[in-house]
Image (tube, rainbow, N blue to C red):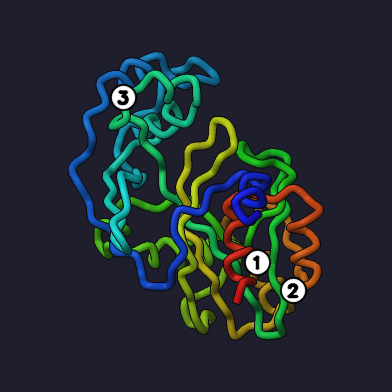
Amino acid sequence: MRDKLYNAMNFELLHCGTKPYLLKFEEATATPMLDDYIKKGDPKTGTPFAERDLVPARVGYVSRRESTIICAPMTWAQHVWSNLDEVRAQLPWYERLRAISVAVLVETADGLYPLALRSKQVTLYPGYWHVSAAGYVDLRKAEQSRSFLPTVFAELHEELNLLPADVVSIRQLGFCRHLTPNVSSIEACFYAKTSLTSEKVRAASQDARDKYEGKYSFVDRKALKNKLADEPFNPAGAATVLMALSD
């Protein structure tokens, strides 16, 4: 029953656990076949990739051993092409890279959850609900810390304008994979609590750097469950909510 529910929400739960993940980096993977696709430029526009898109800046998932995530540097261009199911099917297994992201559900001091209704202008899941903060893991931060936490704090600041001092606790929930066509991302899921009330978080979010990505609504636990059951939800966001509310 649980697996059917997860499949209906387009995610696969790879691991559930609160022991902090340790990131172990390998050297960048050689991707000769994927490189041939990259030479064609952006698959949507056909234009050459910008120089910054060819420089490793993301974290690519390799494997998981208990609470250790084996990963490697990857470029945006590699991510764009390896996302496409038709391309992935032709690649050898070691070139089927998956970018790692984080998804964070926040609970305010007055027991509400900020949810983002994603803008119609974003590329992935436009018009879908998502958890409070989410984004790709930054390679530089991850290599320095061997942890997801710097990216978690960065996303909380960029999307809700929360500072580390505003965060009371952060709990790791688990690891999931998108099952949506042409989305190959892996996501680390977290549950954070803030000392700020929903009113203060709403006010702070008005000045957030990435506020263009979606409009926030603040919902209680019952409304959160209803949205998850009845409205379109980002798969990693759905996984995060289900794990957070399972206690």
Which residue occupies the foreground of this view, 59 or 222? 222
Residue on which disc 3 sits: 92
Q: Earlier in the sequence, mark 2 or mark 3?
A: 3
Q: Which kind of residue does numbered mark 2 sit on?
A: Arg
Task: Locate the N terminus and report the quarter of the image it occupies.
Answer: bottom right
Relative to residue 40, is residue 114 drawn left or right? Answer: right
Contact between labelled residues 3 and 2, with CB atoms less than 8 Å apart? no
Q: Which kind of residue does numbered mark 3 sit on?
A: Pro
Q: Report the number of numbered marks.
A: 3
Q: Position of residue 229 (x, y in %)?
A: 77, 56
Query: On screen, 137 above or below 208?
Result: above
Q: Position of residue 208 (x, y in %)?
A: 60, 62
Residue on which disc 2 sits: 221
Secondary structure beneath dot 1 equals: helix
The CA distance from mark 2 to mark 3 is 44 Å
Query: On screen, 45 above or below 110?
Result: above
Secondary structure beneath dot 3 equals: loop
Residue on which disc 1 sits: 205
Q: Position of residue 48 (x, y in %)?
A: 41, 19
Q: Which disc is residue 124 wearing?
A: none
Q: Which kind of residue does numbered mark 1 sit on?
A: Ser
**Badge 3, how many Cα within 10 Å: few under 14, some, many 20+?**
few
Q: Earlier in the sequence, mark 3 or mark 1?
A: 3
Q: Position of residue 81 (x, y in %)?
A: 43, 26
Contact between labelled residues 2 and 1, with CB atoms less than 8 Å apart? no
**Which is more foreground, mark 1 or mark 2?**
2
Relative to residue 1, is residue 164 drawn left or right? Answer: left
Which residue is pictured at 48% across the width and 76% down the height? 170
